[in-house]
Image (cartoon, rainbow, N blue to C red):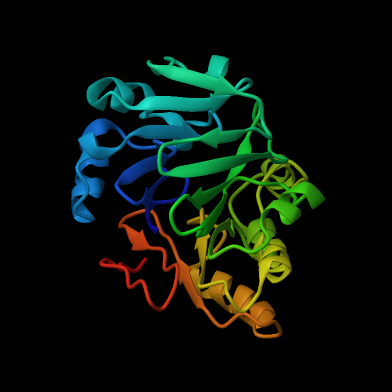
């Protein structure tokens, strides 16, 4: 299995999962031209994508869903709550109830309801049919529920929101109401909260943790890495810790014996 974050953050999110000869895109937060440019950077043809899974309807995750699906005939999956909130709605498409497992050609994708201020947002755990490798993808989460943490066990790679530093958030440019929403139980994970989730998922076989969806105004790659690295240093985790930024693809390592072809920094 191989995976790449094409970009994460408030300006857009998209991630490619590849198992065998099958490819799936998670979220389409970029318009078709930008999506094609980012896919070309990892040598992936847009036409080779078989399916698009939208985690929730917010603009930075879904703005390109309908246009990309129409241009390249991607079959789109979204939760029953997310589907009617997409405007316009992608075609062709299928809705599912959060908690369902999507049985795709070369991988299965378990969906897990998460705590965020969207209609029916989900995290994902994708498992390759041929190798059994597992990748967890957790965006836009106010707090980690027990069901989410349980679903993230025995992963080979974890892509995890680490949105803000709590001190920077309160000292930053946002009014108190916005700070309360971001830091609230249906907002976004702080670096400290992300570290707690990473620790709960840590084991010796976890090849990588990729921190995602960092705020440009209330965080930095250095702050996020320092917080999560310190926490993971007390666990059995011996993999790579990377940061996915908004501007360039980042490879998601799944094991030392399966080198990734591309790796780009923040």
How far from the left and from the top, in percent, is residue 153? 68, 61
| Residue 249 location (% of width, % of height) | 32, 57
Image quarter where the N terminus lies is bottom left
Residue positioned 55% across, 20% down in the render: 95
- Residue 123: x %, y % from top left: 61, 44
Please state, as top left, top right, bottom left or bottom right, where the C terminus lies in the image: bottom left
Residue 49 relative to residue 126: left or right? left
**In this image, 125 relative to 52: left or right?**
right
* Residue at 30%, 67% in the rendered image: 264
Q: Hey, which quadrant is residue 224 in on the image?
A: bottom right
* Residue at (26% x, 67% y) in the render: 261
| Residue lying farthest to the front in this orientation | 130
Residue 48 to residue 2: above or below: above
Q: Position of residue 265 (x, y in %)?
A: 34, 69
Residue at the spot x=66%, y=56% of the render?
152
Regarding residue 218, the answer to whether it shows in the image is yes
Numbered label tally: 0
Q: Is residue 16 left or right of residue 262?
A: right
Residue toward you, 113 or 104: 104
Relative to 62, residue 256 above or below = below
Residue 55 visible to an observer of this rendering? no
Using residue 219 as the reference point, say whether residue 93 is left or right of it.
left
Up the image or down, 258 lies above or below 50; here it is: below
């Amino acid at each position: 299995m191989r995976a790449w974050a094409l970009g994460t953050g408030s300006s857009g999110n998209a991630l490619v999962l590849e198992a065998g000869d099958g490819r799936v895109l998670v979220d389409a937060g970029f318009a078709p031209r930008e999506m094609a440019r980012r896919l070309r950077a990892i040598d992936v043809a847009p036409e080779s994508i078989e399916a698009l899974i939208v985690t929730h309807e917010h603009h930075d995750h879904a703005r390109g869903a309908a246009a990309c699906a129409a241009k390249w005939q991607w079959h789109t999956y979204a939760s029953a709550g997310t589907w009617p909130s997409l405007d316009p709605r992608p075609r062709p498409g299928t809705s599912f109830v959060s908690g369902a497992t999507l049985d795709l050609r070369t991988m299965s994708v378990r969906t897990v309801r998460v705590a965020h201020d969207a209609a029916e947002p989900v995290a994902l755990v994708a498992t390759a049919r041929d190798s059994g490798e597992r990748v967890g993808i957790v965006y836009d989460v106010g707090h980690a529920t027990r069901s989410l943490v349980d679903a993230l066990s025995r992963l080979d790679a974890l892509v995890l929101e680490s949105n803000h530093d709590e001190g920077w958030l309160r000292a930053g440019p946002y009014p108190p109401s916005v700070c309360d929403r971001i830091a609230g139980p249906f907002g976004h994970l702080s670096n400290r909260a992300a570290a707690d989730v990473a620790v709960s998922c840590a084991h010796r076989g976890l090849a990588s943790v990729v921190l995602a969806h960092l705020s440009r105004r209330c965080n930095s790659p250095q702050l996020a890495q320092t917080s999560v690295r310190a926490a993971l240093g007390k666990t059995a985790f011996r993999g790579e810790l990377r940061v996915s930024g908004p501007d360039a693809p980042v490879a998601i390592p799944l094991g030392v014996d399966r080198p990734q072809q591309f790796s780009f920094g923040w």
